[in-house]
Amino acid sequence: MKFIPLTVCGAYVVKSEPFCDERGSFARQFCKREFASVGIDFQIKQCNISRNTRKGVLRGMHYQKEPYPEVKLVSCPEGRVYDVILDLRKDSPSYLKWEAVELSEDNGKSVYIPSGVAHGFQTLEDNSAVFYQLGEFFMPEYYSGVRWNDPAFGIVWPECENRILNKRDSEYELYLQ
């Protein structure tokens, strides 16, 4: 596994290094020892999968508030997504900075997202899935988000004629600094 630091402090692209032979390939997606080697103590408490049937589905920008903030390892085992993280930690040097990584079933990338960082994605093709490994249990009363197109962040999303959002994601309040 390779850990490539992102501009959002504490976030990484985690690149698997597959073993390939005539049967196909095999790759490790998570190894507690390898995460610890870059200073990450990640305890997986829950795993979720988001299946998205159409190109243009946008989910986000989500996070979980204190005292149950989520750490996430996100990958795309099927299809292709534009994955976005946004630093909402006021004491962070990368506060309000965002970064996007394309995740796909072919590129072997995952994104490690520290707590206090919002997450969202837009599908780039039909039938895309996103797999989440979470360091905290889902706590609905602490679940929150910020608007995906808030001008305070300036996130650049891929062009999309028929973007599909749910009501909650389209109606989050604008971020107040």
Image (cartoon, grey):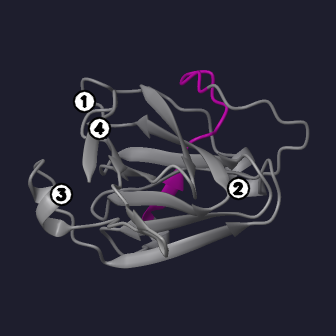
Residue 145 forms part of the magenta stretch: yes
Give the mark, 2 or 1, whose residue is nearer the N terminus.
Answer: 1
* Real-space CA distance between mark 3 and mark 1, rounded to the nearest whole angstrom: 21 Å
Quadrant of the image containing the C terminus:
top left
Q: Which mark is residue 168?
A: 2
Q: Give the range drawn in magenta.
A: 142-155
Query: Hey, what amino acid is under mark 1?
Result: Ser
Q: Which residue in the rendered view is the most extreme toward the front? A: 22
Give the mark, 1 or 4, whose residue is nearer the N terminus.
Answer: 4
Q: Quadrant of residue 83?
A: top right
Q: Are marks 2 and 4 in contact (CB under 8 Å)?
A: no
Query: Hey, what amino acid is under mark 4?
Result: Ile
* Real-space CA distance between mark 1 and mark 4, rounded to the nearest whole angstrom: 19 Å
* Left or right relative to 131: residue 115: left
Quadrant of the image containing the N terminus:
bottom left
Dot 1 crowding, Cα within 10 Å, few <14, some 14–19, many 20+: some
Front label number (2 vs 1): 1
* Real-space CA distance between mark 3 and mark 2, rounded to the nearest whole angstrom: 34 Å
Q: What secondary structure is found at the residue carrying circle 2?
A: helix
Q: Tell me the residue that label 1 is attached to.
A: 92
Residue 10 percent location from the top left of the image: 24, 40
* Real-space CA distance between mark 2 and mark 1, rounded to the nearest whole angstrom: 27 Å
* Real-space CA distance between mark 2 and mark 4, rounded to the nearest whole angstrom: 33 Å
Residue 20 percent location from the top left of the image: 41, 64
Q: What secondary structure is found at the residue carrying circle 3?
A: helix
